[in-house]
Image (tube, rainbow, N blue to C red):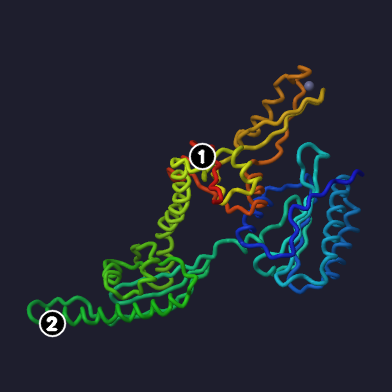
Amino acid sequence: MKGVSLICSMSTAEQISESRLSILLRILRGKKGRGTELISLYVPPGRQVSEVMETLRDEHGKASNIKSRTTRGHVQEALVKVMQRLKAYDKAPEMGLVIFCGAIPRGPPGSEVLELYELVPPKPVNVSYYSCDDGFYLEPLLEMVRPQEILGIILIENSEATIAKVEGKSVEILGNYTSGVPGKSSKGGQSARRFERLRDMVLNDFYTRIGDHVNDAFLAIPKLTRIIVGGPGNTKQEFLRGNYLNYQLKDKIAAIVDTAYTEEQGVKEALEKASEKLERIELVEERKMVQRFLSEVSKDSGSAIYGEKEVTHALEAHKVQTLLISEDFDDVVVKVSCSSCDYTEERRAKEPELELFLSSVKSERCPKCTNFTLTAEPLHRVFDQLLEKAEQAEASVEVISSKTEEGRMLLKGFGGVAAILKH
Ligand SMILES: [Zn+2]
């Protein structure tokens, strides 16, 4: 069979950064093979490459049983390419090695191009893995870039307080403390006032103690980004008004929520109640990016551009610092061709209307031979293509949701694609 051409999209023995990896993952996610023919290989640190080679030679042998001639050819060629790359190593690099290789369709059958991605990830590969599937296996890499934000939780009420650390899905209780504050006095007069004074003293003592514990615990976690304060009633506000917390920690308070509980149950309650506020903070960051873009546009400073065409040019010229792209930018490039003559053209469709578009083409006359023999095939998502260009240009990428006014403005007013240029 005719060999497919190879694009070495990425080949680096140097460790790639987390931000580059996340762009690459968005690109790889969109790659689908025509059959079960895309190869993913994960080699953990220190593993002997000769052993991996043996596995691949084995797979090459097994692949000869694949019924479809095209798929068989693609799988075997991809395996050969991967083995050629592996020859450059004796053993896997310090962080391990990941290789993806497979024939990616560009249009109708026969248009496949063999793509190869070889990378050393930013964190150690912890699996030894091989698969041949219709997509690349990305889970271990996705795990590396998933934001692992560390949250601090303070739950405080009159009688009790809880300090906890939340990292991903794991909750660690760092301390539970009781105040020994007596309940409200029911007696009146002189003794009640004395009682209240005593109560305030004990409470102040308790706040100081909790403040010290929180400062010790949270300042020791430099990666702690945000703090949620919870608990029933007004105690939490009273605690925050007093100067019990270190100023650096005060700045990290992202949400104050009412919770009925303390301890582990209270932590879960606080996380749930704060989630909306935390998400709003992320949106604030996105908003700031778009606002920066808008202000540059209004100043006509020349450092902000928009529109797919212009941004594409700037990316290709490596002039882009930050690419802003709407997550709802859903254009797909479709190749329309005629089966009776040599007519072809490229058109755009919106992803949600793609099926409708593909079938509507069949009822059109070919502009060249006038037969009803037009067919259409999606080539690629423009979103992926822009990310791919940003990746090559080493530009940073902000995917902007349409949940904010600014996000909607980017999509409706600027075509969903904009960029801030390098100075
Ligand atoms: Zn035609």
Q: Nearer the viewer, residue 214 or 24?
A: 24
Q: Is mark 1 within 8 Å of ligand 1?
A: no
Tell me residue 96's x, y (percent): 73, 69
Q: Look at 68% across and 70% down and name the residue there.
A: 124
Q: Which quarter of the picture shows residue 245?
A: bottom left
Ligand 1 quarter of the rendering: top right
Residue type (three-letter) at the residue carrying disc 2 = Arg
- Judged from the image, the secondary structure of the residue bearing numbered disc 2 is helix
Q: Nearer the viewer, residue 321 or 348?
A: 321
- In this view, 190 is above or below 165: below
Q: Is residue 408 visible?
A: no
Tell me the residue that label 1 is attached to. 411
Disc 1 + disc 2, Cβ < 8 Å: no
Pinpoint residue 213: horizontal percent, then vertical percent: 38, 80
Of 287 and 292, which appears nearest the observer? 292
Viewer-nearest of discs 1 and 2: 1
Q: Is residue 233 visible?
A: yes
Name which residue lies at 67% across and 50% down.
Answer: 27
**Which residue corresponds to mark 2?**
194
**At x 76% / y 67%, what residue is drawn?**
43
Q: Tell me the kind of residue under disc 1.
A: Leu
